[in-house]
């Protein structure tokens, strides 16, 4: 279990639109249970094949889709109090608050262990090196030095 699934920007876009629809239709009584179901079981859950991964997905969504997030100062992660739900304010104030958050989002914000960063960085490095090797493999010419000779000296 814990398979890397191919979630898309469309999954995110649809979930955001559904959230906006529920807020617009009933701002005083937001249907968090329905939002959780739509995002977790329909939008994202349709791609999830393992029962444990589906359970993890639904558990993670409960951290974000719940009435507590509407309370001022609600922290998305107790280990990182910088990441809070923004209070209602002007557009400029909201942008300034966003600018003050750290540029790198720690994995704990999403409910992941700190080692998740290592795995992500490793995967990015492997992908970059694979692409680099593909580029080197395609760059052959008539004559000149071999890649080994170029690197070696």
Image: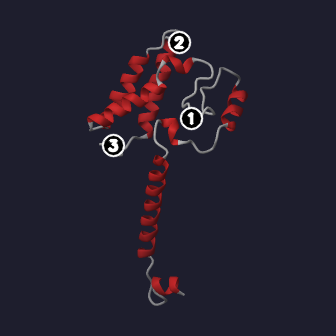
Query: From the image, which quarter does the N terminus lie in?
Result: top left
Please state which of residues 107 and 139 is positioned toward the viewer in this rendering: 107
**Residue 3 drawn above or below residue 125:** above
Query: Looking at the image, which residue is at 29% across and 35% down?
Result: 52
Distance of label 1 from label 3 (alpha carbons) = 23 Å
Query: From the image, which quarter does the C terminus lie in?
Result: bottom right
Query: Looking at the image, which residue is at 48% across and 28% down?
Result: 16
| Within-10-Å neighbours for mark 1: few <14, some 14–19, many 20+ | few
Query: Mark 1 sits on what residue?
Result: 79
Residue 27 shows up from this direction: yes
- Mark 2 or mark 3, which is nearer to you? 3
Q: Is residue 94 left or right of residue 43?
A: right
| Within-10-Å neighbours for mark 2: few <14, some 14–19, many 20+ | few
Q: Position of residue 102 (x, y in %)?
A: 64, 41
Distance of label 1 from label 2 (alpha carbons) = 30 Å
Q: Position of residue 82 (x, y in %)?
A: 63, 33
Q: Which mark is residue 2?
A: 3
């Amino acid at each position: 279990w814990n398979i890397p699934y191919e979630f898309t920007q469309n999954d995110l876009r649809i979930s955001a639109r559904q959230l906006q629809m529920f807020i617009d239709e009933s701002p005083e009584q937001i249907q968090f249970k329905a939002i959780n179901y739509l995002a977790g079981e329909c939008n994202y859950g349709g791609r999830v094949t393992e029962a444990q991964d589906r359970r993890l997905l639904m558990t993670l969504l409960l951290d974000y889709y719940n009435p507590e997030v509407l309370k001022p100062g609600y922290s998305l992660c107790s280990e990182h109090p910088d990441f809070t739900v923004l209070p209602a304010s002007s557009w400029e104030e909201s942008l300034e608050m966003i600018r003050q958050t750290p540029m790198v989002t720690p994995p704990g914000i999403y409910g992941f262990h700190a080692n998740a960063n290592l795995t992500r960085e490793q995967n990015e490095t492997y992908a970059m090196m694979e692409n680099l090797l593909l580029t080197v493999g395609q760059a052959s010419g008539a004559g000149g030095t071999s890649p080994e000779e170029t690197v070696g000296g």
